Image: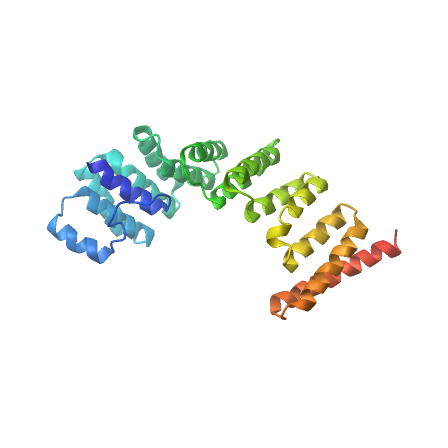
Amino acid sequence: MLISAFAFSALISSGTVQAHAGDHRTIAELDAIIKESPVEPSLLVARGALYSRSGQWDKAERDLSLAEALGNKDDVAFEFGQFYYRRGEYQKALGYIDRYISVYPTLPAAFLLRARTASEAEQLDMAIESYHIYFSLSPDPQPGEYLAAARLLASTKPAGINNALALLDMAISKLGLNPQLQRYAMQLELRRDDTEGALDRWYSLKDQLGGTPEWGITLVRVLILADSVDEARLAVQAVKDRLISLRQTPARKAAGETIARLERQLAEVRTNP
């Protein structure tokens, strides 16, 4: 069926779903095949997708337009949505994506593309709704996708941060304790002045990150914000001891300078209660 070929092209270009065999063909390989089957829409879509991904706009538009003329316009709509998204023409992209979704309303990749496009177009309600639909449909959302949606939620008022934290916690319950997600959740706790919540989240990463100077430095900073001065001093010493045991690198030298500044800050707290 024509849709299977178009769906494979759409999904591989989105990077979301593994497609059929042959989805790693190069432009040169497709050129040779298209010479033998010049009116096969699925091949034109596949080549147009590759042109689009490499920024060869005129060639991409030519192939996609020809495929649209030869086949089902709805089936080409996803790749046209990708094309205009990459070009920064977000309203045009949304028109094509919505057409595709109206015909194929259960494909996760289409909602992820709409979420990203609507976000760039500053249509936040549409972007947030699309992310939620995507998460409900996709069998394997990635941490970066949850993070993007959480950042979007956190930018909205008045309950944005709370909603973002709820999404992050849902993601963590599904994916497991992920440092990228928990780190951002900790930052959101600080934004709503919940230092206790921030500390709980940061301590939860101790088994994964606790051996790194960066984890200790962040812990010191949060403890200072929480007015836990004595604990902050202990954390400073722990980071210093850790740095001494590690081979010196530019990054670790910078960490040492940071911890020295924090130590001076804590000394001022002691002398100026």
Q: Position of residue 153 (x, y in %)?
A: 55, 36
Q: Nearer the viewer, residue 251 or 49?
A: 251
Say if 126 sits above or below 263 in the image: above
Q: Quadrant of residue 204?
A: top right
Q: Position of residue 110 (x, y in %)?
A: 36, 37
Q: Nearer the viewer, residue 272 or 142?
A: 142
Q: How is the image coloured?
A: rainbow
Q: Nearer the viewer, residue 50 or 58?
A: 50
Q: Position of residue 104 (x, y in %)?
A: 31, 31
Q: Is residue 155 visible?
A: no
Q: Which quadrant is the N terminus positioned in? A: top left
Q: Decide if residue 136 is on the left or right side of residue 6.
A: right
Residue at screen point 49% across, 34% down: 128
Q: Is residue 107 visible?
A: yes
Residue at screen point 66% across, 40% down: 189
Q: Quadrant of residue 101?
A: top left
Q: Position of residue 142 (x, y in %)?
A: 46, 44
Residue at screen point 26% across, 46% down: 61
Residue at screen point 77% across, 56% down: 234
Marker count (numbered): 0
Q: Decide if residue 18 is on the left or right side of residue 234.
A: left
Which residue ends up furthest to the bottom in the rendered image? 248
Say if 170 sits above or below 263 in the image: above
Which residue ends up furthest to the front in the rendered image? 207
Q: Decide if residue 34 is on the left or right side of residue 128.
A: left
